Amino acid sequence: MLPTRADFPEGFVFGAATSSYQIEGHGFGGAGRTHWDDFAATKGNVIQAQNGQIACDHYHRMDEDLDLLAQLNVDAYRFSTSWARVLPEGRGAPNKEGLDFYDRLVDGLLARDIKPAVTLYHWELPSALADLGGWRNRDIAGWFGDFTETIMRVIGDRAWSVAPINEPWCVGWLSHYVGAHAPGLRDIRATARAMHHILLAHGTSIERMRGMGIGNLGAVCNLEWAAPADASEAAHAAAARYDAIYNRFFLGGMFKGTYPDLVLEGLEPHLPRNWQDDFPTITAPVDWCGLNYYTRTLVDAAGDEPWPHYSQSSGDLPKTSMGWEIYPQGLTDFLVRTQAEYTGDLPLYVTENGMALHDPIEDGVVDDTARQDFYRDHLEAVRTAIALGVPVKGYFLWSLMDNYEWAFGYEPRFGVVHVDFETLQRTPKASYHALSAAFRK
Ligand code: FCB
């Protein structure tokens, strides 16, 4: 059985999350081209070269989707604002239709008594800015600050919370070193600069919003538990390096004003000149911290691999259809560790957590028992952290509906609502009904 609202402290926020490029349909409403359109157009990068031009057509089906949220009994909705929809060229003239869309979205949420939890950037960089070097260009901090002000002038008065950038590790490392996300680079200098500029842009955005009098500002990091593949010293050292790059670099920058030595070992020669001078902006105080959590990985030393000299594998735990091991303990451990080492008394939120399943639809029913078990076990992991004294204030499931799962296209289904990508029909899955009952007020 899923734990219910009554099992959590008074005022605990239950929510659901999505992101703009993954659901809206970037072909509609005057949105500009994004680097994900370019990345997907490069054959071999994305399953079947699929992109987000139509996605879930949320752009035209917003009201229906907001009704689904309301019936899920959530308190908050975490969505993102597309930079390219608001500013098709990344800078300059805003797209009035885009601003109106987010204005209506926020009003539609408030009309249903749902808190708007805004993420400003969930990966759809305007192509015009990618042409100028994107995250490699230091000027992006100012461009992002300007975008922040443009969108916040319209919805900042009604936003419940705002986080500038979703998952800095994906924006930086995964996109510039692994090359698995747009812009698909494999370049250490690009990586070092992108990782640093992401944090500079984060801090700049926070400062601009403070200047506008907007409150309840946070940061959202994705964390992946790194376990040594065996008991050897080499595997432990490799796991520590993985952990430093993935989990400690961004939290360390924002909350301590330092980068871990295990990361500097590789990146320092490639960081921009006088990078330390940016920490006063990077550490601009926030009001909360969000953790996105999905899985753990087993890490081993791999001397033949380029720096950071590790390899990854998965263990024997049950897996999602992404092949990700299901490891709820990691969520408790990250909440405990984040409080102890980085955030202290600051409220923590689980800003994403969920699983992909194959989810066939039979006679209008999707019987996703495994997803209900996943949510049960991870909600229990949150309860454990709360019992240990960690100030966890809310939990957002990923995702409200099946959507564009980046390089994996439309195949992985993370939603609690099924989407038929031919007809765009929405069908709540069994997990939706169970969660709706658990979240009942
Ligand atoms: C996270 C992303 C989100 C989605 C989930 C499965 O890393 O923030 O957009 O892709 O993973």
Image (tube, helix red, strand yellow):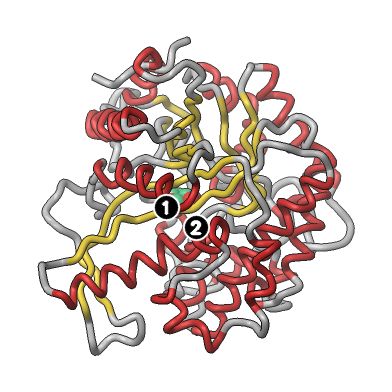
Q: Earlier in the sequence, mark 1 or mark 2?
A: 2
Q: Quadrant of residue 241?
A: bottom left
Indicate whether 94 appears above or below 152. Answer: below
Residue ranking furthest to the right: 93
Q: Position of residue 214 (x, y in %)?
A: 77, 38
Residues 415 and 77: in front is: 77
Q: Position of residue 267 (x, y in %)?
A: 49, 82
Q: Count of labels shown?
A: 2
Residues 366 and 398: in front is: 398
Q: Quadrant of residue 430?
A: top left
Q: Mark 1: which secondary structure?
A: helix
Residues 261 and 55: in front is: 261
Q: Is mark 1 within 8 Å of ligand 1?
A: no
Are discs 1 and 2 less than 8 Å apart at CB? Answer: yes
Residue at 44% x, 39% y: name it: 350
Residue at 42% x, 49% y: name it: 338
Q: Residues within 10 Å of mark 2 (few under 14, many from 20)?
A: many
Kind of residue indicated by mark 2: Leu
Residue at 28% x, 29% y: name it: 380
Residue under pointer 2: 251
Q: Position of residue 377 (x, y in %)?
A: 25, 32
Kind of residue indicated by mark 1: Glu
Task: Describe residue 323's horizontal placement relative to residue 176 as left or right.
Answer: left
Q: Dividing the image into 4 quarters, which one contains the N terminus?
A: top left
Residue under pointer 1: 341
Q: Position of residue 141 (x, y in %)?
A: 73, 66
Indicate whether 333 appears above or below 13. Answer: below
Residue at 69% x, 68% y: name it: 127
Task: Describe residue 371's horizontal placement relative to residue 118 as left or right.
Answer: left
